[in-house]
Amino acid sequence: MKVAAKIISTVFHPTVMPIIGLFIIFNTDSYINYAIPAELKKAVLFLVGTSTFLIPLLISLLLLNRGLINSLEMETQKERIIPYAFTIAFYVFTLYMLNKAPMPPIIFNFIIGATLSVMLAFIINIKWKISAHMIGVGGLVGALFCVSMLLEIYITPYFVVGLLISGLIGSSRLILKAHTPLQIYAGFALGAICQFAVLYI
């Protein structure tokens, strides 16, 4: 069970959620799919993938090599401070770059929601260890719901799969004893609320 939980936690790492969300939005049966050129979609996915996944991963590996963190899981609040700070910086950079691209507001707002959730996670983490994994998947599920309402499109299968994955991730974090149930629920709620706040309200 622990091996499976570790695999799930690794595959569905919070840093991959923005890429998954964008990929789904770009391929929905909506004006976004047809209004944005394929090359621009690829460029945006590359930018987001590099800034919010690849670079934070490389920084985490560097911190691990220098002994500043004990593992990529970053089990303590103290270990998460530096990675969070770097992640926020690159999210802000991503927003800066996206603001220069001819993108529909919903794409920009989706990344704003993700950036807001990371910032709040950083602040909360100073006093309390909230689940970053659940923040990521909560943001994805929340964004999918908002997008389906705003664009009036049918993406229920994605939404249901997102909920199922949320359950798998939450269970995995509990099996690994990385978080308490409250930290799991709070993380999911924070991620979803941040997307609601920027996309739907």
Image: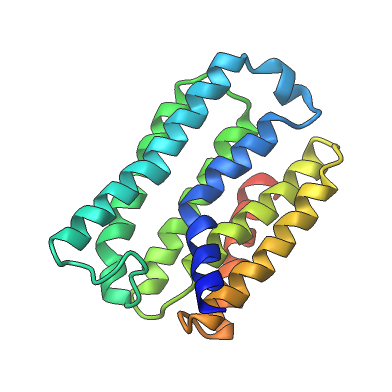
Residue 54 coordinates in the image, percent (x, y): 36, 42
Residue closer to the observer: 96 or 170? 170
Residue 167 on image: x %, y %: 68, 70
Foreground residue, 97 or 161?
161
Q: Position of residue 108 (x, y in %)?
A: 55, 35
Which coloring applies here? rainbow
Identify whether 112 is placed above or below 94: below
What residue sits 63% from the left and 52% below the top? 140
Left or right of 5: which side holds 58? Answer: left
| Screen quadrant of the N terminus | bottom right
Determine the residue positioned at 76% across, 48% down.
158
Q: Is residue 31 visible?
A: yes
Vertical placement of residue 88 versus 187, above or below: above
Image position of 32 (left or right of 39): right
Residue 182, image x, y percentages: 57, 83
Q: Is residue 183 visible in this depiction of the protein?
A: no
Q: Is residue 10 above or below residue 130?
A: above
- Furthest residue toward left: 66
At 75% from the left and 55% from the top, the residue drawn is 161
Task: Residue at 45%, 21% (x, y): give it.
Answer: 100
| The image quarter in which residue 107 lies | top right
Q: How many marks?
A: 0
150 left or right, relative to 80:
right
